[in-house]
Amino acid sequence: MSDAQIGFDTKFERGNGADPEVFAELGEVINLSAPGISRETKDATHFQSPEKWREFIKGLLDAGEFSVEIHFDPDGPTAAQMMADIIEDGPITYRITFPDGTEWTFSALATGFEPGVPMDDKMTATFTGKLTGKPAFVD
């Protein structure tokens, strides 16, 4: 049996900064690229590295970026909120809830809001952000 699932019913939410944080869904999401984790490597090669092979050590972790595509309403509250998040200097808490209930919560700096307005198709917008700090991956 396969572990494959569809993404239908995934939620993308924005926190309100309160304690405890209260989350509200942002727009009609039609595509989501969740953040991924990567780790830098640092060259540790020295004059006596065995047989002239480069050596590396692990560097810092990076939680990556996210990207959310929504139905775009130029006069809607979602577009206004996303543009306000771009102007905000500090990080904002976002949460992704997958169909099985797994939640990924993270702080991110909103970095982009790009509307697409085709002549003969629906309008969409892409909202992007760069994670800062350690995300929480909860089952």
Image: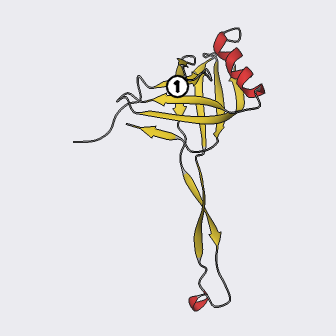
Residue indicated by mark 1: 12
| Visible residue check, residue 24 | yes
Relative side of 11 to 63, left or right: left
Q: Which residue is at 65% across, 33% downward? A: 128
- Label 1, secondary structure: give it: strand
Q: Which residue is at 65% across, 80% downward? A: 45
Residue that lies at the very extreme toward the left in this rendered image: 1
If the image is split into quadrants, where does the N terminus sit?
top left
Q: Is residue 72 above or below residue 108?
A: above
Indicate the colouring scheme: secondary structure
| Visible residue check, residue 118 | no
Q: Is residue 7 above or below residue 74?
A: below
Q: Position of residue 67 (x, y in %)?
A: 60, 34
Residue that lies at the very extreme toward the front in this rendered image: 19
Q: Amino acid at mark 1?
A: Phe
Q: Which residue is at 71% across, 8% downward? A: 75
Q: Position of residue 40 (x, y in %)?
A: 61, 60
Answer with the quarter of the image where residue 99 lies: top left
